[in-house]
Amino acid sequence: MRLRLAHKLGMILLATVILSAGISAVIISINTRSAFLKLVRENDIQNARTIADSLETYYGQYRSWEGIGEVLENPFTIAEDQRGRNTQPGMNPMGAMGQMGHMGSRFPRGSERGPLFRVLLADTKGEIIAHTFEQELPESLGQRALDKGIALFNDGKKVGYVFVGSMIEPAFGPFQQAFLMNVYRSILLASLIVGILFPLAGILLMRRHITYPLQQLSEAAQEIAVGHYSLEIDNPRSDEIGELSRSFKQMAAKLSAADKWKRKLIADSAHELRTPVSVLQGNLEMMLEGVYPLNRERISGLYGETLLLKRLVQELQELSHAESASTVYNFSVVDITALLHSVIENFRTSAAAKNIELQFRMPENPIEVYADTDKLRQVITNVLKNAVRYSPVDGLIRIDLSKQLNGTAMCSVEDSGGGIPVDEREKVFERFYRIQQDRNRSSGGSGLGLSIVHEIVLRHDGKVYFEEPKFLPGARLVLELPVLEQSAEQAYT
């Protein structure tokens, strides 16, 4: 049987509370008994000192311990009887002893309550004279035991020792035992209450603050698994579960965006590929049916459509590689000045076909960056290709390269074309996006070139963006890359 998290946490909490309550009860009981035994011993020693005065009075009166067993059960009455004897002349010692015997008989040995005190009287040699202990005791005590008793004196001479309760044995009398039993019952009752109520309260709190929010996240994950991303997960808590809920919400938003991007990518790819495929299919069907003649001109047109298909597939593959985290970039020290000059020279032929002038302004000293040469060449090529495509006949393209004070190499490309509206300057880096005036394929590209540029520049810790033109009326694209000192340090850490 599979246990749910709530059941596991409840069992762990129950076991922890019961174990803690049990250990606490045992420790408290042991400490209570030890402390109580110490308290009883101190009290017995104090009682022994008090009784010693009465016993010394008794010995001083009768000059012996004869008859002490009759009054030992309540020795405190000995001093009271002595005071009564002094105030009532004519009472003989036996009368006093009879009174003391009567007082001592209130708790006779063998009665239900037992003697009031467990008292033991021993002579100086350790021989036990009398006691009120209910258990059997040895006939004499050793010197070690005598040292723990209270010595009795008469005229400066030691005449015996008195012991009370725990001074002889570490045991409790019936009153102390009854008290300890009440304490033990209270500890047991408190442990049962803690062991029952606390787990119940803990389980209720866990269900509300732990398992219920986790159950909500589990249900939300199941909804996401089937493609439902519009979930309301509002958990304002500041603990780990609140952080988990917020992270989950962010993940759901990113998954929703990724799903929308995937659907858009599939739809845009199908749209871009549909046109050349339809042209190829239609022309081939007409040729097979004999409607169109099978000549070089027709075949050349179909070949152009296959080149368009090839270019779309190649750009999709390049975008996939640029976005993939597993794509390996071969970083090395690159002189971006020389690289720009090389790419610009390769474009002079295509620019000359539209009579476009290319102007390149660069610093005297080379600017080195840490980059993948082939990927960076691809970035510059795509940027210049767009500039040439959107520049009119007899237009101008200006390329500026400089090293900024913030440690970056900045390359700007301006053209004399129609420009890009401000609200579309960020959108042009999206996949398959073409500005409004270039929705047809006759003058525009596939809409993937700048997306590839954006991904490659990000992998180089750089930035690419459009801003207001400074020298020409068209568009101004700015590319920023860290110079060697910063990028190399980042690459090797």
Image: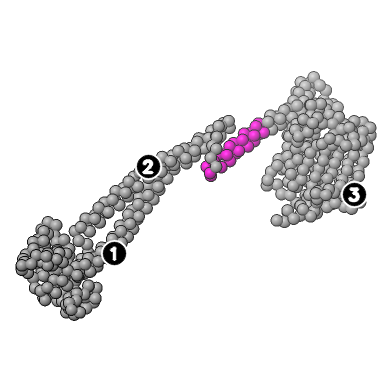
Of 35 and 401, the residue lying toward us? 35
Location of the C terminus by quadrant is bottom right
Which residue sits at x=60%, y=39%? 251
The answer to whether residue 193 shows anywhere in this view is yes
| SS state under label 1 | helix
> Type of residue at label 1?
Lys
Q: Quadrant of residue 199?
A: top left
Q: Which residue is mark 3?
A: 363
User: Where is residue 159 shown, x and y percent of the image?
Assistant: 16, 77
Question: Which label was assigned to residue 263?
Answer: none
Is residue 484 in the magenta section? no
| Residue at x 12% of width, y 56% of height | 112
Residue depicted at x 52% and y 42%? 241
> Is residue 250 a member of the stretch shown in magenta?
yes
Do labels 3 and 1 touch, CB within 8 Å?
Answer: no
Number of residues whose C-alpha sits closer than 10 Å to that of mark 3, classed few (under 14), some (14–19) or many (20 or more): few
Alpha carbon distance from label 3 to label 1: 95 Å
The disc at residue 38 is 1
* Residue under label 2: 200
Q: Is residue 152 shown left or right of residue 286?
A: left
Q: Give the quarter of the figure containing the N terminus.
A: top left
Q: Residue at x 50, y 36 (%)?
A: 216
The residue nearer to you, when weighing 23 against 161, is: 161
SS assignment for the magenta stretch, majority: helix
The kind of residue on which mark 2 rests is Leu
Q: Is residue 91 left or right of residue 338?
A: left
Comes first in the chain, label 2 or label 3? 2
Rendering coords of residue 37 (x, y %): 27, 63
